[in-house]
């Protein structure tokens, strides 16, 4: 039995799936195409002086240029979904205010809401990407290479470290003041 409107719902769902797949695929192609340039820019901005060419020769693989892309590829579907959901919701709310036909305000509000929703996923993923890109320098100085899961653990650790840091600093200052002159 066919319920009225079910074909429309199925068509809308199929369009959403197509948009989702197209968004993920286009994002993946764009990331693969621009990742080597992004790595060079990230290294320059961080003050790393080792040329990318030397990093490639040291590791013996050109694939080092795509270091840090995995978190972004895994997060792209969620990122795009949040952008589309936020955009649609923001646009519908703005259109409900009957600003007038042909107004650009609903598109602006939709873009703002979509970007806001997307930022909660994109920012941590970008941080992971940058840390993976700079991992070569850290590994060279500490003789230990961090995996993505270890970087995620580091990403989560600062929240607890900063919460306890002031009390540890206070304890250190108190200990220094109460220490005997011979211990200073």
Image (spheres, grey):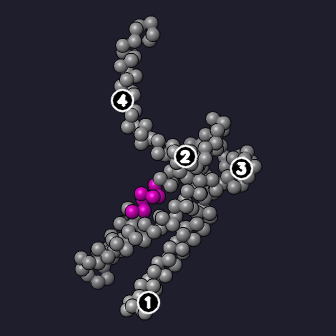
Q: Is residue 166 left or right of residue 97?
A: right
Q: Which mark is drawn over residue 167?
A: 4
Instruction: Please state the horizontal and vertical placement of residue 138, each as a whole percent of the image.
Output: 61, 40
CA gap, disc 1 to disc 2? Answer: 46 Å
Q: Earlier in the sequence, mark 2 or mark 3?
A: 3
Does dot 3 land on a helix, a strand or a loop? Answer: helix
Q: Please name the residue shown 42% across and 92% down the image.
A: 2
Image quadrant occupied by the N terminus: bottom left
CA gap, disc 3 to disc 4? Answer: 44 Å
Does dot 1 land on a helix, a strand or a loop? Answer: helix
How would you rate the neighbour count of disc 3 (Cα within 10 Å): few for under 14, some for 14-19, many for 20 or more? Answer: some
Instruction: Please state the horizontal and vertical placement of residue 26, each as a whole percent of the image.
Output: 56, 71
Q: Please name the residue shown 40% across and 12% down the image.
A: 179
Q: Earlier in the sequence, mark 1 or mark 2?
A: 1
Q: Which residue is mark 3?
A: 56
Q: Which residue is mark 1?
A: 7
Q: Please name the residue shown 36% across and 25% down the image.
A: 170
Residues in magenta, as a range: 117-123
From the image, state whether disc 1 or disc 4 is nearer to you: 1
- As displayed, is residue 92 above or below residue 1? above
How would you rate the neighbour count of disc 4 (Cα within 10 Å): few for under 14, some for 14-19, many for 20 or more? Answer: few
From the image, state whether disc 2 or disc 3 is nearer to you: 2
Q: Is residue 114 left or right of residue 141?
A: left
Does dot 2 land on a helix, a strand or a loop? Answer: helix
Q: Nearer the viewer, residue 110 or 46?
A: 110
Instruction: Please state the horizontal and vertical placement of residue 120, each as a whole percent of the image.
Output: 42, 57
Image quadrant occupied by the C terminus: top left
How would you rate the neighbour count of disc 1 (Cα within 10 Å): few for under 14, some for 14-19, many for 20 or more? Answer: few
């Amino acid at each position: 039995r066919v319920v009225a409107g079910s074909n429309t719902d199925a068509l809308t769902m199929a369009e959403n799936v197509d948009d989702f797949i197209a968004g993920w695929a286009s994002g993946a192609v764009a990331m693969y195409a621009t990742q080597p340039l992004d790595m060079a820019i990230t290294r320059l901005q961080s003050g790393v002086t080792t040329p990318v060419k030397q990093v490639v020769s040291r590791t013996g693989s050109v694939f080092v240029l795509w270091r840090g892309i995995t978190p972004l590829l895994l997060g792209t579907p969620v990122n795009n979904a949040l952008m589309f959901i936020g955009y649609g919701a923001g646009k519908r709310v703005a259109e409900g205010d009957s600003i007038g036909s042909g107004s650009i305000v609903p598109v602006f509000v939709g873009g703002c809401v979509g970007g806001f929703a997307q930022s909660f996923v994109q920012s941590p993923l970008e941080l992971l990407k940058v840390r993976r890109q700079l991992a070569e320098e850290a590994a060279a100085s500490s003789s230990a290479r961090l995996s993505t899961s270890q970087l995620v653990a580091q990403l989560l650790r600062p929240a607890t470290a900063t919460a306890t840091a002031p009390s540890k600093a206070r304890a250190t200052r108190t200990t220094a003041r109460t220490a005997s002159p011979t211990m200073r």
